[in-house]
Image (spheres, rainbow, N blue to C red):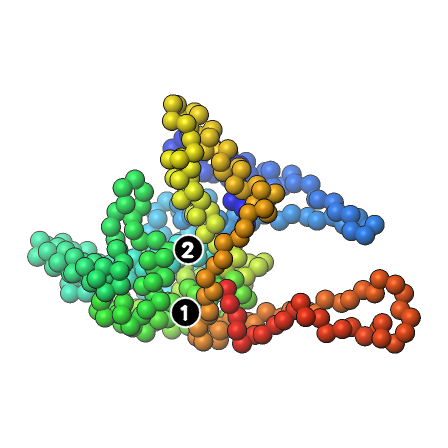
């Protein structure tokens, strides 16, 4: 609910720096004292378990000493190994704790398909000759134009100052309309659909039926390799298809609840606050004002006064419902405020505050 800054350093983000700062945080986590609560006269202690799942790929690579961003930080596979159909991947279980970075999984999968579609004519990982380069350029221009006209999406265009226009929303729109996306890109419609189902299932925030989920992952990987084995699968796509089942199994809550989305959403706030709510007379005061704004807006008390913006209800499709386990809601036992006196007091009334309708799960 709240993404709160705990430290601000003006320094280059190196592997060494990431490790030093992470260790400092881990040390603080280890030293956390249990919180004591008083519940109707009895004292209850709550222990805290903090998980490092709001990390981006760069941080995961630094912490697992993976020096190339093309390598998988869970099993150490290189791009050639990832596209080897019969290969078995030995996972390092210590690295499951970083979660799956589900938001980045959407974006990287989308970009992977986009780049495959640019190179569909030459069917090669890298365009080397000038003829091949021209072909890729022409195809990519055409595809970008069609995305703009037919879906209203501006894809793969660098944004001044930060990243590109490929964000979570672009990716969800691409996968959300597989028929049209397949028509524009010339890619296989089933593989786009499968990715959509896999990613939506992971993000749903519900428990996942791992047997069925893993089946779909392996099936999708086979399909990918049969169609596009000439394009090296990006590490994020490999992680999704090979390791996601194991990672989900070891996570203590449904994986969709461990998304890095809350933190990424703060980037937008940072830019807005810096532009409109800071003094610009020196770098020091600009950053002080920015941090103050971040602290204020993430304050639990202030936040509780704010009206929660209504989220558009997002119904899960039938394919996703097949892969998730419907949540069970236990009826709350009713505690009589006075000692039971007659037969009626022993009956638990049918409480209306736990309406469960498992056919209609919404996020
Ligand atoms: Zn791997």
Task: Name the residue at 39% across, 23% down.
Answer: 282
Q: Is residue 31 above or below residue 327?
A: above
Q: Secondary structure at mark 2?
A: helix
Task: Name the residue at 43% across, 48% down.
Answer: 265
On the image, the x and y values in percent for residue 299 come to 57, 41
On the image, the x and y values in percent for residue 273 come to 42, 37
Task: Name the residue at 45% across, 66% down.
Answer: 314
Tell me if label 2 and label 1 are in contact, CB under 8 Å. Answer: no
Q: Crowding near pointer 2: few (<14 within 10 Å), some, many (20+)? A: many
Mark before the other along the chain sequence, 2 or 1:
2
Q: Nearer the viewer, residue 191 or 344?
A: 344
Residue position marked by numbered label 1 in the rendering: 197
Q: Nearer the viewer, residue 246 or 37?
A: 37
In the rendered structure, the answer to whether residue 38 lies left or right of residue 363 reads: right
Query: Does the residue tagged 1 have its C-beta within 8 Å of any atom of ligand 1?
Result: no
Q: Nearer the viewer, residue 41 or 323?
A: 41
| One can see residue 215 in this view | no
Question: What is the quadrant of residue 169 in the picture?
Answer: bottom left
Residue 154 — which label?
A: none
Q: Secondary structure at mark 1?
A: helix
Residue position marked by numbered label 2 in the rendering: 103
| One can see residue 311 in this view | yes
């Amino acid at each position: 609910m709240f993404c709160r800054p705990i430290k601000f350093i003006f320094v280059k983000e190196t592997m060494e720096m990431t490790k030093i700062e992470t260790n400092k945080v881990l040390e603080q986590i280890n030293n956390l004292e249990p919180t004591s609560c008083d519940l109707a006269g009895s004292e209850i202690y709550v222990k805290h378990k903090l998980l490092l799942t709001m990390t981006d790929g760069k941080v995961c690579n630094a912490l697992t000493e993976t020096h190339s961003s093309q390598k998988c930080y869970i099993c150490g596979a290189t791009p050639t190994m990832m596209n080897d159909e019969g290969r078995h991947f030995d996972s390092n279980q210590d690295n499951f704790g970083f979660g799956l970075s589900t938001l980045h999984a959407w974006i990287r999968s989308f970009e992977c398909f986009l780049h495959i579609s640019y190179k569909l004519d030459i069917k090669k990982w890298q365009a080397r000759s000038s003829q091949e380069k021209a072909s890729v350029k022409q195809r990519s221009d055409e595809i970008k134009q069609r995305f703009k006209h037919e879906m209203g999406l501006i894809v793969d265009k660098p944004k001044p100052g930060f990243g590109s226009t490929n964000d979570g929303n672009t990716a969800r729109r691409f996968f959300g309309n597989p028929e049209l996306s397949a028509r524009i890109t010339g890619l296989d419609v089933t593989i786009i659909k499968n990715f959509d189902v896999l990613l939506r299932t992971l993000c749903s925030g519900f428990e996942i039926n791992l047997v069925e989920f893993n089946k779909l992952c392996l099936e999708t990987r086979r399909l990918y390799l049969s169609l596009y084995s000439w394009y090296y699968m990006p590490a994020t796509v490999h992680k999704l298809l090979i390791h996601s089942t194991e990672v989900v199994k070891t996570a203590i809550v449904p994986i969709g609840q461990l998304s890095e989305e809350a933190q990424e959403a703060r980037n937008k706030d940072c830019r807005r606050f810096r532009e409109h709510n800071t003094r610009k007379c020196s770098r020091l005061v600009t950053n002080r004002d920015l941090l103050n704004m971040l602290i204020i807006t993430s304050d639990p008390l202030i936040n509780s006064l704010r009206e929660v913006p209504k989220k558009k209800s997002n119904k899960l499709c039938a394919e996703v419902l097949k892969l998730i386990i419907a949540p069970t809601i236990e009826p709350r036992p009713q505690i009589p405020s006075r000692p039971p006196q007659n037969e009626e007091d022993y009956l638990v009334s049918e409480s209306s505050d736990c309406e469960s309708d498992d056919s209609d799960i919404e996020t």
